[in-house]
Image (cartoon, grey):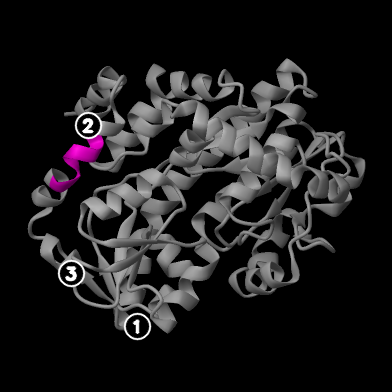
């Protein structure tokens, strides 16, 4: 199974290699040049990133000719320009945290290291961005842990499973503040996949939102729900009785409005900043997933940094991750109140124990060989 996933990932990467290397000049850390988005991607990104330039401008960051957000004056004199892409807009808490990461890098390196940020999936979906990271034409990416499992990092399947943590505090504590989280980053770095694990983002609950009220397990039956294009996410939603539809995040808004899907899943902040309330009026407060996103760096460009600068990058990301957690807590109630004013109903689950029970067979199947890790994750903080 593991070898099959690696083979598929390598074949996909090879198929993109020629075009990406041609477009990007085989990017290096000192002169990273991520591939520009296609016209359709750029069009969708423009709407999602509304207001991003004005928010970023406070730190000297503005929109570059290719759509990336960068402090152009600082970049012109920097030793290294690190490129990063994310599916979320710059106005989201994730986007703000990445911009903070850029500020920290610039400050701590005395201007030697500058960040260029491509928000709103400007460079493609998750698989495309991860392939670019493998090639070195994109330096960094916040990825789904189960996507890394599909790329061949076997232990990532466990942290991707539902119903692991009792709350977000427990997830933050074990992933960011224990040897368990560091060991999983080491697994990424030592996997031979071309990725270096440099840090984490531990998110708020990844909840469902739908075109109808949902309060119990039977309400999910037959629901067409968008799923990240990974096998674990597909199996998770199938276990709950839904019909998962693999879709890129950039397609969710339109697919909800046209009825291609009935539901999707993401955090409250993502629902809010991507204006999903315009096409979806029910937000379900289920707590099956507290996503732990590994942040990976391209091995091809990571090795061009000194050991001191590598540590500096990790430390700056740790500060950005802390900023993310603090900001999420501060903004959640405000976002919820505004959404309620816009007519969004927040649905309370009455039988989430049944949801967890329905997922247990797939949890046991995916955790084979990692029973000790599963136990550590499930019992932490209890």
> Residue 263: x, y in percent?
33, 69
Q: Is residue 216 visible?
A: no
- Could you give the CA–CA distance between mark 3 and mark 1, rounded to whole angstroms? 19 Å
> Residue 67: x, y in percent?
76, 63
Taking the magenta stretch, the answer to whether it contains residue 359 is yes
Q: Quadrant of residue 256 in the image?
A: bottom left
- Could you give the CA–CA distance between mark 2 and mark 1, rounded to whole angstroms? 41 Å
Residues in magenta?
A: 358-364
Instruction: Please name the residue that numbered disc 2 is placed on.
Output: 364
Which type of secondary structure does the marked residue at label 1 adopt?
Answer: loop
Which type of secondary structure does the marked residue at label 2 adopt?
Answer: helix
Q: Quadrant of residue 299 in the image?
A: top right
Q: Quadrant of the C terminus?
A: top left
Q: Residue 8 carries which label?
A: none
- Mark sitting earlier along the chain (3/1): 3
- Mark sitting earlier along the chain (2/3): 3
Residue at 69 percent across and 23 percent down: it is 310
Residue at 82 percent across and 45 percent down: it is 18
> Residue 240: x, y in percent?
20, 55
User: Residues at badges 3 and 1 in contact (C-beta under 8 Å)?
Assistant: no
Instruction: Please name the residue that numbered disc 1 is placed on.
Output: 342
Q: Which of marks 3 and 1 is in front?
A: 3
Q: Which of marks 2 and 3 is in front?
A: 2
Taking the magenta stretch, the answer to whether it contains residue 374 is no
Q: Which mark is residue 214?
A: 3
- Mark sitting earlier along the chain (2/1): 1
> Residue 336: x, y in percent?
32, 68
Which type of secondary structure does the marked residue at label 3 adopt?
Answer: loop
Is 157 positioned to the left or the right of 20 in the image?
A: left
Q: Residues within 10 Å of mark 3 (few under 14, many from 20)?
A: many
Is 217 positioned to the left or the right of 107 in the image?
A: left
Q: In which quarter of the image is the N terminus?
A: top left
């Amino acid at each position: 199974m593991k070898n099959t996933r690696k083979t598929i990932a390598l074949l996909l990467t090879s198929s993109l290699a020629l075009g990406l290397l041609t477009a990007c000049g085989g990017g290096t850390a000192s002169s990273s040049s991520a591939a520009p988005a296609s016209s359709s991607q750029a069009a969708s990104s423009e709407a999602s990133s509304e207001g991003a330039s004005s928010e970023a401008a406070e730190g000297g960051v503005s929109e570059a000719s290719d759509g990336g957000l960068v402090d152009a004056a600082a970049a012109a004199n920097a030793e290294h320009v690190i490129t990063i892409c994310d599916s979320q807009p710059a106005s989201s808490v994730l986007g703000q945290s990445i911009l903070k990461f850029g500020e920290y890098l610039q400050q701590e390196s005395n201007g030697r290291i500058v960040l260029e940020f491509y928000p709103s999936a400007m460079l493609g979906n998750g698989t495309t961005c991860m392939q670019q990271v493998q090639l070195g034409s994109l330096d960094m990416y916040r990825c789904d842990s189960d996507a890394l499992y599909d790329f061949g990092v076997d232990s990532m399947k466990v942290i991707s499973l539902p119903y692991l943590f009792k709350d977000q505090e427990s997830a933050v504590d074990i992933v960011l503040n224990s040897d368990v989280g560091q060991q999983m980053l080491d697994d990424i770095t030592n996997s031979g996949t071309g990725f270096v694990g440099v840090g984490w983002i531990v998110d708020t609950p990844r909840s469902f939102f739908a075109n109808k009220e949902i309060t119990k397990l039977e309400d999910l039956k037959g629901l067409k729900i968008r799923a990240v294009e990974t096998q674990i996410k597909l199996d998770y939603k199938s276990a709950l009785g839904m019909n998962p539809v693999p879709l890129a995040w950039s397609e969710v808004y339109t697919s909800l409005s046209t009825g291609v899907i009935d539901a999707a899943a993401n955090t409250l902040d993502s629902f809010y900043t991507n204006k999903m309330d315009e096409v979806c009026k029910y937000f379900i407060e289920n707590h099956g997933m507290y996503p732990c996103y590994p942040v990976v760096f391209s091995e091809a460009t990571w090795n061009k940094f000194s050991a001191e600068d590598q540590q500096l990058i990790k430390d700056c990301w740790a500060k950005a991750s802390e900023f993310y957690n603090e900001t999420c807590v501060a903004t959640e109630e405000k976002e919820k109140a505004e959404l309620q004013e816009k007519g969004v109903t927040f649905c309370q689950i009455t039988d989430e124990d049944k949801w967890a029970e329905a997922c247990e067979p797939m949890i046991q199947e995916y955790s084979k060989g990692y029973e000790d890790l599963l136990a550590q994750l499930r019992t932490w903080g209890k």
